[in-house]
Image: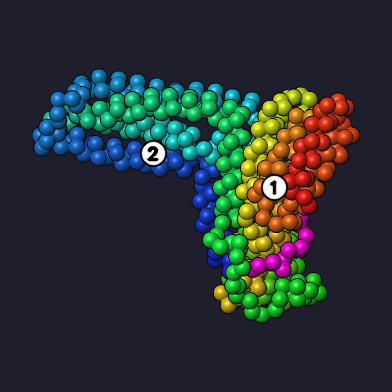
């Protein structure tokens, strides 16, 4: 966990920075395979009701169908609908079974999180939903064929719509095969994670007009260092009630409850950290407000068995690093995949370099500090991006050179001497690792040349 360094940086009212719980609920709904199919099934049922009403109107002679509406006998209509329903449900079972098998094999190389990305993909959810909706529509239409005192009732429009949905399903099947074949290609997987990283950075650290200029801040009440001292001396600990990864924190809710109780809350963990039941989750001053804050905190944070990108951009960095170190392992030995990951890591880190990360202090609308947490430090992100790859690439000049080039690229986007110091430290460690592990003099000369060029352009 990050230290409290940087907590005295700029503080802003929470309303401009953090999302509240509804956004987390929406994200959790997106990562399911039932929401979109359920919506499409409801739509199919409503469509069936509409077409059936039109069929009954035609049956009683109130309207006349155009010539292109299929006219079927009762037995013929049943055969058509049975064939459609059977074909659709068979295709769904076979295609998704084969797809999940292929994804399972691919995830062994790319990492287990690929299965979660497959479930989260909207295209996959729509494909399943359209197939299942067609099946439900066909079954409902099949049950509507009946006999009345005027003779057999055959829903001609409904059968025609079912046949049209079958054509739609054929198009969706072709799209799905193309989409899956494309999405399991390693460059696409890496680029998709990089897009997630970009979106997470933009959501967590939005680029505001005038970020480079000082901004007037509300600043009333005690200072941050004074509050930290009071919390350390007299604060009451709030324990965690569940074990798991901290997925979401409702900063808005916590600021509201702290303002209502005239208290200050210091969070000991950030989203992405693993918390253990019974261990400290937060500290509250004054201690008398701990019970109310504990109840609010139980509703304002979410834990789960895995990390998510909500409020945790480092998770996407770790995903790219995981793919890179798998590629560098002796069992896989895929250098080019590692180089691709390094390129995208450099792009993400360069984007972070232009953002303000001092978001560890949250004030209420009157300007009083109500919530303190550890900053998402730039050094932590840079280390997570390069440390493990550097350690796994000893004796591999191509990867070492690409890391130095990536650091040079990120340097172009840095906005402070502190950021350049952090990146230079990484370059120093890469050079030392290369001098210890690379035996070919010419390769070592290339590495030293890249390092010298970086240091000359961006002196610490």
**Callout 1 secondary element:** helix
Q: Is residue 157 visible?
A: yes
Circle 1 packing at 10 Å, graded few (<14), some (14-19), many (20+), is: many
Circle 2 packing at 10 Å, graded few (<14), some (14-19), many (20+), is: many
Nearest-to-viewer mark from 1 and 2:
1
Q: Quadrant of residue 396?
A: top right
The answer to whether residue 438 is left or right of residue 252 is right
Does the stretch in magenta take in 5?
Answer: yes
- Residue 411's disc is 1
- Residue 176's disc is none
What segment is highlighted magenta in the picture? Answer: 1-12
Q: Residue at x 74, y 56 (%)?
A: 417
Q: Quadrant of residue 267?
A: bottom right
Predominant secondary structure, magenta span: loop
Residue 399 in the image, given as x and y percentages of width and height? 75, 32
Residue 383 in the image, given as x and y percentages of width and height? 76, 47
Q: Quadrant of residue 11?
A: bottom right
Q: Residue at x 72, y 66 (%)?
A: 7
The residue labelled by disc 2 is 41
């Amino acid at each position: 966990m990050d230290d409290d360094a940087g907590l005295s940086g700029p503080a802003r009212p929470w309303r401009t920075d953090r999302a509240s719980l509804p956004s987390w609920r929406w994200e959790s709904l997106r990562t399911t395979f039932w929401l979109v199919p359920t919506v499409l099934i409801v739509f199919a049922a409503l469509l069936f009701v509409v077409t059936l009403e039109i069929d009954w109107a035609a049956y009683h002679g109130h309207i006349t169908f155009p010539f292109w509406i299929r006219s079927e006998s009762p037995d013929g209509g049943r055969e058509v609908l049975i064939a459609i329903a059977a074909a659709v449900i068979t295709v769904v079972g076979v295609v998704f079974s084969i797809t999940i098998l292929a994804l399972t094999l691919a995830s062994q190389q790319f990492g287990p999180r690929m299965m979660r990305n497959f479930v989260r993909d909207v295209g996959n959810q729509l494909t399943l939903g359209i197939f299942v909706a067609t099946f439900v529509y066909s079954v409902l239409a099949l049950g509507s064929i009946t006999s009345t005192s005027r003779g057999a009732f055959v829903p001609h429009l409904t059968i025609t719509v079912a046949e049209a949905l079958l054509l739609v399903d054929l198009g969706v099947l072709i799209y799905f095969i193309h989409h899956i074949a494309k999405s399991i290609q390693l460059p696409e997987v890496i680029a998709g994670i990089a897009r997630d990283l970009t979106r997470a950075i933009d959501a967590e650290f939005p680029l505001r007009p005038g970020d480079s200029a000082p901004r007037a801040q509300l600043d009333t009440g005690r200072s941050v260092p004074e509050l930290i001292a009071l919390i350390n001396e007299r604060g009451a600990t709030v324990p965690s009630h569940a074990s798991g990864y901290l997925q979401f924190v409702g900063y808005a809710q916590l600021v509201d409850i702290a303002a209502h109780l005239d208290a200050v809350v210091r969070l000991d963990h950030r989203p992405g950290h693993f918390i253990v039941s019974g261990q400290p989750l937060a500290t509250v001053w004054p201690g008398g407000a701990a019970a109310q804050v504990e109840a609010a905190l139980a509703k304002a944070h979410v834990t789960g068995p895995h990390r998510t990108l909500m409020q945790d951009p480092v998770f996407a960095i770790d995903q790219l690093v995981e793919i890179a170190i798998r590629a560098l392992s002796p069992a896989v030995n895929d250098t080019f995949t590692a180089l691709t990951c390094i390129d995208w890591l450099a792009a993400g880190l360069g984007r972070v370099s232009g953002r303000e990360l001092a978001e560890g202090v949250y004030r209420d609308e009157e300007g009083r500090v109500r919530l303190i947490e550890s900053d998402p430090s730039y050094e932590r992100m840079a280390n997570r991006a390069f440390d493990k790859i550097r350690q796994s690439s000893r004796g591999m000049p191509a990867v070492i050179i690409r890391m130095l080039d990536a650091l040079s690229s990120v340097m172009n986007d840095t906005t402070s001497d502190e950021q350049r110091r952090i990146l230079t430290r990484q370059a120093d460690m890469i050079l030392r690792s290369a001098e210890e592990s690379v035996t070919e003099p010419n390769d070592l000369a290339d590495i030293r040349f890249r390092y010298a060029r970086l240091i000359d352009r961006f002196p610490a």
